[in-house]
C-alpha cells in the first residue's frame, strides 16, 4: 500500500487532489477522438449523475479544456452549487471547431482563453491551467511566451497552479523545472515518459497522468493493474481517467483505493 493516501499534495502547489481524477473529454466531444468505440455525449441528467457519483466516491479533481467541445461550459453549469468541492484543471492553446484542432499559444490568446474559461466554468479562479501542447513542445516553451503569460495571470490571482500537458520527452524535461504541474502520458503500452516522471520528482513538480488506460485501448486487459502500475510511480500524484460510465468509475476507484487505502 502507498504511504501517500487517497488525497495527496499536488507537487508543491498547496493543492490537494484525489489519487484518481475524472477526465471530461467525453462530456463534451465525440469527434476527432481516439477512443476505440463511438459514444454518445451524456445528457445533463447522466452527466450530473456521473459527477455526483465521482464526488461520493471521493474524487475532487476534474480535467477539462477548451478543446473538449462543450465540456467546460457544461461543467460550469453542473457545478454551480458545489464549485468549492472541486479542483478544476483546464488548458490553453488548443481550440477545436468544425472537427478540427487549431492552435494558438500567443500571450493574447492565452489571456483571452483564461478569461473565457473563468466565465464558462463560473469561477473566480482556475485551480490548474496547463498549456495544451500540439506536440511542438520546445518551440512553445522557447518562443511562445505561454508559460510566462500563465505566470502573470497566476500572480494576479486568476490561476492557482500552472503547467503543461507536453507530448515529447524533450518537452517534458524542459518543462518540469518551469512548471508547478505536468500532465504526462503513462500506460503499459507507453513508458517513454519515465525520464519526465523522474525530472518531475527531482524538481518537486506535481504530476497528473493522462491516458493511463491508453484511451481505452488497454481497458479490456487488467484495468486494475494498469492503474496500480501508473500510481506506483513515485512522481505521480493523480491519474486522470476519462469515463462516462459510473460502473467503470467505481471500479477504478476500488482499484486505486487498494493501493492508497
Ligand atoms: N493533451 C492532453 O492534454 C490530453 C490528451 C489526452 C487526454 N487528456 C486528459 O486525460 C484524460 C484521460 O485520457 P483519455 O480519456 O484519453 O484516456 P484513458 O483515461 O486512458 O481512457 C479512457 C477510456 O477508457 C475507458 N475506461 C475507463 N475506465 C474503464 C474501466 N474500468 N473499464 C473499461 N474501460 C474503461 C473509458 O470508457 P467509458 O467511458 O466507457 O468508461 C474511456 O473510453 C482525458 O479525459 C483528458 O482529461 C489530456
Image: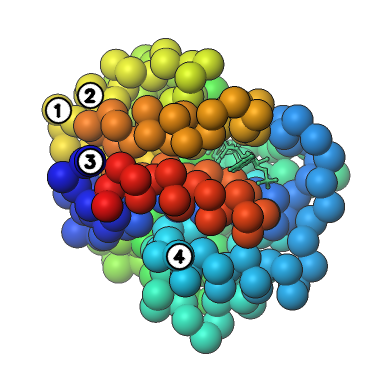
Q: Determine which residue is flagged by label 4.
A: 57
**View quadrant of ligand 1:** top right
Question: Residue 12: x percent and y percent?
Answer: 17, 49
- Distance from Cα at disc 1 to Cα at disc 2: 5 Å
Residues at marks 2 and 4 touching, judged by CB atoms closer than 8 Å: no
Question: Residue 190: x percent and y percent?
Answer: 49, 16
Asked if 224 appears above or below 255 in the picture, the reply is above
Q: Determine which residue is flagged by label 2.
A: 199
Q: Earlier in the sequence, mark 4 or mark 3?
A: 3
Q: Determine which residue is flagged by label 1.
A: 202
Other residues around mark 2 within 10 Å, as few (<14) / some (14–19) / many (≥20): some
* Residue under the point 22% across and 24% down: 199
Q: Determine which residue is flagged by label 3.
A: 1
Whether residue 209 is visible to the viewer of this picture, yes or no, is yes
Other residues around mark 1 within 10 Å, as few (<14) / some (14–19) / many (≥20): few
Asked if 203 appears above or below 160 in the picture, the reply is above
Amino acid at each position: 500500500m502507498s504511504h501517500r493516501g487517497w488525497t495527496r499534495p499536488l507537487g508543491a502547489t498547496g493543492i490537494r487532489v484525489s489519487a484518481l481524477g475524472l477526465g471530461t473529454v467525453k462530456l463534451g466531444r465525440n469527434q476527432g477522438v481516439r477512443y476505440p468505440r463511438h459514444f454518445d455525449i451524456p445528457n445533463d441528467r447522466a452527466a450530473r449523475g456521473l459527477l455526483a457519483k465521482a464526488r461520493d466516491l471521493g474524487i475532487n479533481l476534474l480535467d477539462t479544456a477548451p478543446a473538449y467541445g462543450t465540456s467546460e461550459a457544461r461543467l460550469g453549469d453542473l457545478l454551480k452549487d458545489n464549485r468549492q468541492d472541486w479542483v478544476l484543471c483546464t488548458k490553453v492553446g488548443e481550440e477545436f471547431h468544425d472537427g478540427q484542432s487549431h492552435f494558438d499559444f500567443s500571450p493574447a490568446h492565452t489571456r483571452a482563453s483564461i478569461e473565457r474559461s473563468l466565465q464558462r466554468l463560473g469561477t473566480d479562479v482556475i485551480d490548474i491551467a496547463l498549456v495544451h501542447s500540439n506536440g511542438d513542445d520546445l518551440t512553445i516553451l522557447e518562443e511562445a511566451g505561454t508559460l510566462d503569460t500563465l505566470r502573470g495571470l497566476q500572480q494576479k490571482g486568476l490561476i492557482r497552479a500552472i503547467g503543461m500537458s507536453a507530448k515529447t520527452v524533450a518537452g517534458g524535461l524542459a518543462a518540469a523545472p518551469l512548471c508547478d504541474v505536468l500532465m504526462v502520458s503513462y500506460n503499459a503500452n507507453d513508458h517513454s515518459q519515465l525520464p519526465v516522471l523522474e525530472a518531475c520528482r527531482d524538481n518537486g513538480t506535481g504530476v497528473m497522468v493522462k491516458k493511463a488506460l491508453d484511451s481505452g485501448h488497454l481497458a479490456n486487459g487488467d484495468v486494475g493493474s494498469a492503474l496500480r502500475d501508473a500510481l506506483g510511480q513515485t512522481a505521480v500524484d493523480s491519474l486522470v481517467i476519462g469515463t462516462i460510465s459510473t460502473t467503470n468509475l467505481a471500479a477504478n476507484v476500488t482499484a486505486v483505493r487498494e493501493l492508497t487505502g
